[in-house]
Image (cartoon, grey):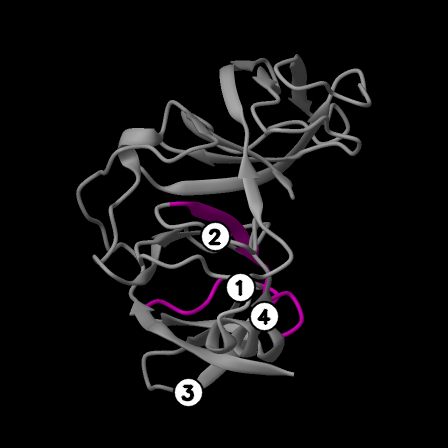
Amino acid sequence: MKTLATLVVMILVVGQSASAQAPTPGVFGTALELLPPGEPGELSIVVVGPYGEIGVPIIVRNNTEETVYDLEILATIRDANGTLIAAEESAPRPSVLEPGAIAIDRLPFWTDLPGPPPVGSTYAFEAYTTTEAAYLALAGVEHPVRTIPLEVNSAERSNSQIIGRAVNTSERPLTTGPTITVMCFTNAGEATEYYGASMEPPIQPIAVGVEFPFSTSTEEPIEAVCDRFLVLVYTIG
């Protein structure tokens, strides 16, 4: 069961933009200065890419003073007449957002919309949390899950991959691989594609302070425009 978060309900028209903001922990890349700041005190959808093969890429920024748990995004598309033509729900990465942190997601809409929406369509986004998370917050009980951003030391485009190195900056060894997500952008700041990445080769456990390499999959080469990119690396504690 879910409950609509009271933090924000935002409606964005494709093409909306804003000025950039300082980077957040666990985020690295050549597109950092392209990220809009979002609205102060709100949970904001700060990036909405065009409809493509992956659907619609988005970035969420938590500009509140509270950690947001079990975050989910319900997105709808309406045509110029206001008719609902597609709906999709998804949990961004990560779904636990500390204040100032960002999450990356893609909303495919494949079931309802096999191709791009008509010109003049608008997207609406609603931020949800689970009922359990809302009850814990009201009761003042600490949620058992938290996101721990990991420091990225380097990342670069190498032919059809993004490769880089990150370090375990958490307070404990990592017994499972961290989550690594890459989003590509044009030089103009338009989000174009979303990729997962993994450690190469797998290293487990990763001791505190140990650096590890990562790359996007050779089985899913980067074919979209990727003039700039962001890498988001974190683990769950």
Magenta span includes 117: yes
For label 4, the residue is 89
User: How far across and how far down the image is residue 225, in percent?
Assistant: 47, 31
Q: Is residue 175 visible?
A: yes
Residue type marked 2: Leu
Residue type marked 4: Glu
N-terminal-most mark, 2 or 1: 1
N-terminal-most mark, 1 or 4: 1
- CA separation in Å, label 3 and label 4: 18 Å
Q: Residue at x 35, y 86 (%)?
A: 82
Question: Which range of residues does the magenta coloring cover?
Answer: 101-120
For label 2, the residue is 97
Which image quarter holds the C terminus? top right
Which image quarter holds the N terminus? bottom right
Check if mark 2's residue and mark 1's residue have beta carbons within 8 Å: yes
Q: Report the magenta stretch's main SS.
A: loop
- CA separation in Å, label 1 and label 4: 11 Å
For label 3, the residue is 83
User: How far across and how far down the image is residue 177, in percent?
Assistant: 75, 32
For label 1, the residue is 71
